[in-house]
Amino acid sequence: MIKKALLIIVKLMLIQQVGIAQFKLSAEFRPRAEFRDGYQTLSEPDEKGVFLITQRTRLNASFKDKNKIESFLSFQDIRTWGQFNLNTTASTVNLYQAWLKFNVVDRLSLKLGRQEFEYDDLKILSNSTWRLQARTHDAALLQWQSADSSFQVHLAGGVNNDQQVLFQTLYTTSNYYKNMGMIWLNKKLTNTELSFLFLDLGQQLADTSINHFKTIGIYGVQKFGDLKLTGSFYLQRGKNQSDQNVEASMVALQLEVPLSQKTSFTGGFDILSGTSAENQQDPTFNETNSFIPLYARRHRYFGVQDMFYAGGFNVPGGLADYFVKFKHTVNAKLNTAIHLHSFSTRESIFDATTSSITGEKHLGYEVDAFINYSPYNDLRLGFGYTQFFATESMRILKQRGDEGEMAHFAYLQLSYTPTFFSK
């Protein structure tokens, strides 16, 4: 695949050289060293922390021809150092993005192919860039905007299959949708921004029928001088892949306040509904009230230690996250930040060990600290350290580990995004 990728890029460069196109060749090198000791889950007393290094490498080519048709290719290799021996013949390169975009009529464009979706507060749709593999969608995206760009409408859709087929078959790719439809409306004013989002995920059942899992929400930003208030509210309805009725919601609010020219404070909350332990244990209760933040940047919002809604772990009883964040900009190249979180479930928790239900909802506190340094525009160095102070309820929720054990995580990440060629 890498040979094909290079061949395509060379052809694009040859086209560019005759002066009929705009062409850019760029890359991303992102190695990240991590120390995990209680990352994503609590550790047992006899478990030891682990040090590992991961790396994401991308080669990107963007192209715009004389008719203003845009295209973009991104090839990606992801790996943990030592994952493959030096003599491996396994292919590790895959296609991360591949799309083309052209104008249908004035101010109306169509974007087709594998692409990132990033909308509003990134709590429903994002590229999940912290994850090594990140996230893209195979979709068609129709985009319209007003003459002054203050109003936008996006319509998206996609249909997925495991392979080319002649008749309807079961789509077996786990944790993914069979088909998708999206509507996004956005209006910007001088100090205000409002958005509406409708996302319908068609989830296939074993008999090949489709359940429709719907997320509907609004997002808003209001500025009051130097203050910035951001909020969102989402509902989830329909049926999920387990054929349960869905009745769930999420509300989020945060206020950003500048304390000085270099220091800012942000305070707020994210509250996601959940299903009580009593209802979870009731075989006649064919409903879920647990909100799922789908393709959110979970690492950004629910604590850097990724205890919640990461690694395939959803929180049945829902989550209340109250946070305060401080950021200090030392200079144009260096900034620091500290985040404090208090986590609780919304509903009771079932203890599988004792077959009992606990009403104690507080899960613990998390403290995150960051240092980010950018000596050059395309080179960034980030360090983070986080510690989670768990309660017994957290151990019950995770169904493993010891709340008395230290749960901490640290990373050092280098990100280099050079442009090899641009004209």
Image: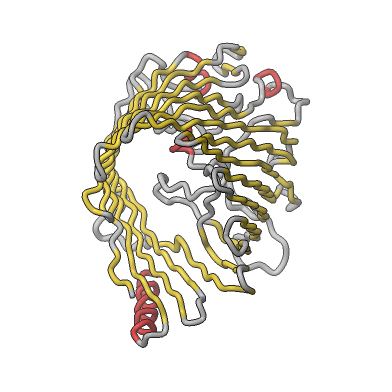
> How has the structure been colored for display?
secondary structure
- Tell me, yes or no, if residue 140 can be seen here: no
Left or right relative to 7: residue 378 = left
Left or right relative to 238: residue 355 = left
Give the image quarter of residue 57: bottom left
> Which residue is at the far left?
375
Which residue occupies 55% across, 57% down? 137
As drawn, 65 above or below 37: below
Left or right relative to 30: residue 195 = right
Give the image quarter of residue 283: top right
On-image quarter of the N terminus:
bottom left
Residue 255 x/y as whole percent = 49, 30
Residue 394 x/y as whole percent = 48, 19
> Which residue is at the far right?
284
Total numbered labels: 0
Left or right relative to 52: residue 269 = right
As drawn, 389 above or below 123: above
Which residue occupies 47% across, 82% down? 66
As drawn, 165 above or below 363: below
Which residue occupies 48% across, 36% down? 225
Residue 15 x/y as whole percent = 39, 84
- Tell me, yes or no, if residue 205 can be seen here: yes
Residue 140 x/y as whole percent = 61, 64
In the foreground, 368 or 407: 368
In the foreground, 243 or 275: 275
Give the image quarter of residue 358: top right
On-image quarter of the C terminus:
bottom left
In the foreground, 371 or 305: 371
In the foreground, 396 or 290: 290
